Each structure stands twice: as C-alpha cells, then as structure tokens.
Amino acid sequence: MPAHPTPREPEEELDPEQEVPEANGELDEEREREREEETMEESGEDRESEAGSNSEDSEAEEEEEEEEEESSEMDDEDYERRKLECLDEMSDLEKQFMELKEKLFRERLSQVKLKLEEVLAGHAGEYKEPLAVLQRNMQLRTEVAGVYKELCLQVIKHKYDCELQGAQQHLESERSLLLDTMKTELLDQIHRLEEERQSRDISSEWWSDELKGKKCRRRSHTARPERRKKATLVSGPYIVYMLKDVDILEDWTAIKKAKAAVLPLKKKSENRQQYGARCQGGTLYYEGERFCKGNTILLHVKEDSTSQAVITAVSSGEVWLRRTDGSKTKIYVSQLQKGKYTISKA
C-alpha cells in the first residue's frame, strides 16, 4: 500500500512585533524544496508498493498454471468418461425408440385390419353413414324420375290427343269442303243447263210443226202398213218423257218461276255467311283485323260457348290455337271463311 505523506509541521508563529527577515524570493525557494522532498518520498513509497504487488502477481500466476494443468488432466478423464456414458445412453434410447416404433406399427396395422374387416362386413360407422346418404339420394332421385316419367307420358298423351283431334277436325273440314265444292259444281252445271235450255227458241209454231209432222207420219203409216218403223239409235244420255210436250212445257215454266224466286235468297244467305279471311306472311287477316302469333283471342263456335285461346302458329291455310285448359286446336281458313268458327280480339 502506498505510504501516506507525513503531516507537515505547523510553522512557528511569528511575533507581530518581529519584522519580516526574508524577502518574497526566499519564501518561494523554501516552498519548492519542500515540495521536491515530498514528491521524492511519495515516489519511493510507490516503487516499493509496485515491487510488492508484482511479486504477489507472479506467485498467483504460477499457482493458477499449476491448478490449470491439474484441472486439464481431470477434464480429459472426465470428458472421456462422460462421452462413453452419453454413447451408451444414446444407444439405449435408439433401441427403445426402435422398439416403440415397431410396437406402434403393429398396433396401427392391427387397427387398420380390424377396420377393414368391419367395412367388409358392413358394420363400420364410417361406411354406414355415407351408405345411408347414398340410399336416401337414390330414393329421392328414383321418385323424381318416376314423377318425370309420368309427366312425360302425360305430355305425350296430350300431344297424341291433340294430333288426333286435329286430324279429325281436318278430316271433317276437308269432307265438308269437298261436299261444298261438289255441290257448287253440280249447281253450276244445272244452272248452265238451264241457261242453255232457256236460250233455245221454243215457240208454238215449232210445236205445231211437230204435231203436223206426226199426223202425216200416222197417215203414211196407215197407207203403207207394210213398212215397219225403224228403231232409233241412242248415243249418250237420253231422257224419255212420258208426258205430252204441252204438259212438259207448262211444268218447265212453273219450275223456272219457282227457281227464279229461290235462287236470289240462296245467294243472299251464302253471301251473308262468307267472311273475309286469309293468311299472308305468318299473319292472319280476318274481317279487317290483323292477328299474329302470341295474340289472345276469343273463339266463337257454332252451337258452343265462347272460349279464350292464344295463337301459337299461323301458316298458309291453317291457324293453331292453345286454349286455357292446355289443349291445342287447329282451324282452317276455309272454316273461318264459311263462318264455322269466328274469332275476335280479347
């Protein structure tokens, strides 16, 4: 330890009456000498303390080196021993791990085999639940397929009924149209024959000439009985009148008068029953009105109630309608012209 500096002795007190013997320079020199002495003493003490501390440090270092050598020898032996112990423990742990791994594998394999047997037998819950869901889906789809089948059959039946009804109506309309055409043709032929017959000049002179000729023939027949009357050859249609010519003429005039009174009435009634109807470019023109596909109309049928329908198609000569009950009806333009069916906008 460094030595503490010795305390300075107090300077003697000067008498107040004594005069100052020395000047300022002398006082400074004395103070410097005292300071040098003090520093020399302090440096010597420091050197002694440093020498002591150096000797102590060297001794401690030597002791530490010896201890380190001994401890290094002990550490090598301990390290080898602990290394062997760790290797043994690692080998034991590896054996235990392999045993546990084999055991776990066997247990897992046994569980999988047991689950497979349950699935094959149909007792596993993982198999029953999806199977129940699939069965429910199958029943539902079977019911839906049955309903769809019934609906398809109903649709096919309705189509068949509509086609059958349309064919029957077509047959009836064609039949009535054929009868009407034949009737008109026959009436036209009769009318032409009547006009031709009326155009002939039938006069009383012609009848008188005929009568005279007949009398002459009778006389010639009586005069010459030996001659026989030749048979007349008939070619084509021939009408044999059993009445006399005068009676036939009277009957003909009466029939002509009656026909002249009846024919205008028939023409008026036929003209009244005719309606203006035609199809052009997918559009029906009826009595000045225009009907297209999708229009809602009121269908009037003779001796039947009025029904509402929708036009589904318009072609050349026929019109397809769908009624409110879902049935389809086909109407021909000729039926509209004759007044069998009448339509109007709803």
Image (cartoon, helix red, strand yellow):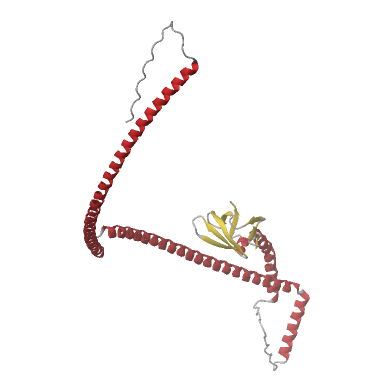
* Any part of residue 96 in sight: no
Q: Is residue 282 above or below residue 229?
A: above
Picture quadrant of residue 252: bottom right
Image coords of residue 295 (percent x, y): 59, 55
Most foreground residue, 221 or 22: 22
Residue at x 71% of width, y 89% of height: 221
Q: Residue at x 65, y 71 (%)?
A: 185
Q: Is residue 344 above or below residue 119?
A: above
Occupied quadrant, residue 177: bottom right
* Nearer to the camera, 230 or 233: 233
**Image quadrant for the N terminus?**
top left
Q: Position of residue 74 (x, y in %)?
A: 23, 51
**Does 220 sit left or right of 47 as displayed?**
right
Give the farthest residue toward the top: 17
Q: In the image as oriented, which residue stretches furthest toward the bottom?
A: 226
Q: Nearer the viewer, residue 3 or 309?
A: 3
Query: Outermost residue, front direction?
Result: 21
Toward which corner of the image does residue 258 lie, by quadrant? bottom right
On the image, the x and y values in percent for residue 66 come to: 26, 47
Count of number-bearing discs:
0
The answer to whether residue 48 shows anywhere in this view is yes
Residue shown at the point (37%, 60%) measured from the top left: 141
Up/down of 92 relative to 174, above or below:
above
Check the image and report above or below for 51 versus 36: below
Q: Is residue 295 left or right of residue 127?
A: right
